[in-house]
Amino acid sequence: MSEEKHHHHLFHYKKDEDNTFEEVVDYKKEEKQHKHHEHLGELGAAAAGAYALHEKHKAEKDPEHAHKHKIEEEVAAIAAVGAGGYAFHEHHEKKEAKKEDEETRGKKHHHLF
């Protein structure tokens, strides 16, 4: 496979005065993408948590296969924690993209206190 640049359409290039290309990032689009991924992470955490509760209930109701259900419950709980961590990560990426957008547009906030 050749070495190609794969762009996610979050930025494009424009020529400046000395005829060189300057990278221009679309922070609004990036912020929207991180928000979407944050929501997907939240949905994944909720779904995995619900499945963990379902398996816990099955373990109580089916003592013959309780060990199998307990393992599946624990795996689902770990998946829920991972999805929650991903949502948390994307939330901070979204905040960073918003901050970058404000800085490029000249809306710098100076917090003194």
Image: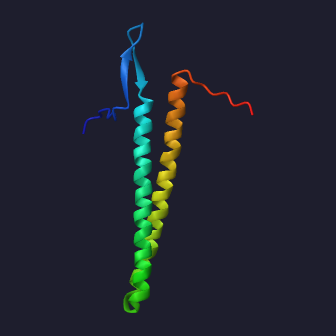
Furthest toward the top, the residue is 17
Furthest toward the left, the residue is 1
Location of residue 43 (image quadrant): bottom left
Location of residue 7 (image quadrant): top left
Question: Nearest the camera: 25 or 111?
Answer: 111
| Count of marks overlaid on the render | 0
Question: Nearest the camera: 63 or 14?
Answer: 63
Percent of width and height locating residue 19: 38, 9
Location of residue 72 (image quadrant): bottom left
* 83 sits to left or right of 103: left
Q: Is residue 89 above or below residue 27?
A: below
Q: Does any portion of residue 17 appear in the rendered image? A: yes
Q: Is residue 45 above or below residue 7?
A: below
Furthest toward the right, the residue is 113
Furthest toward the bottom, the residue is 64
Quarter in which the C terminus is drawn: top right
The colour scheme applied to this rendered structure is rainbow
Percent of width and height locating residue 26: 41, 28
Q: Which residue shows up at 40% across the image and 88% down it?
A: 61
Q: Which residue shows up at 52% across the image and 30% down it?
A: 100
Percent of width and height locating residue 111: 69, 31
Q: Which residue shows up at 40% across the image and 64% down it?
A: 47
* 112 sits to left or right of 54: right
Question: Nearest the camera: 60 or 4?
Answer: 60
Quarter in which the N terminus is drawn: top left
Q: Does any portion of residue 70 appear in the rendered image? A: no
Q: Which residue shows up at 40% across the image and 52% down it?
A: 40
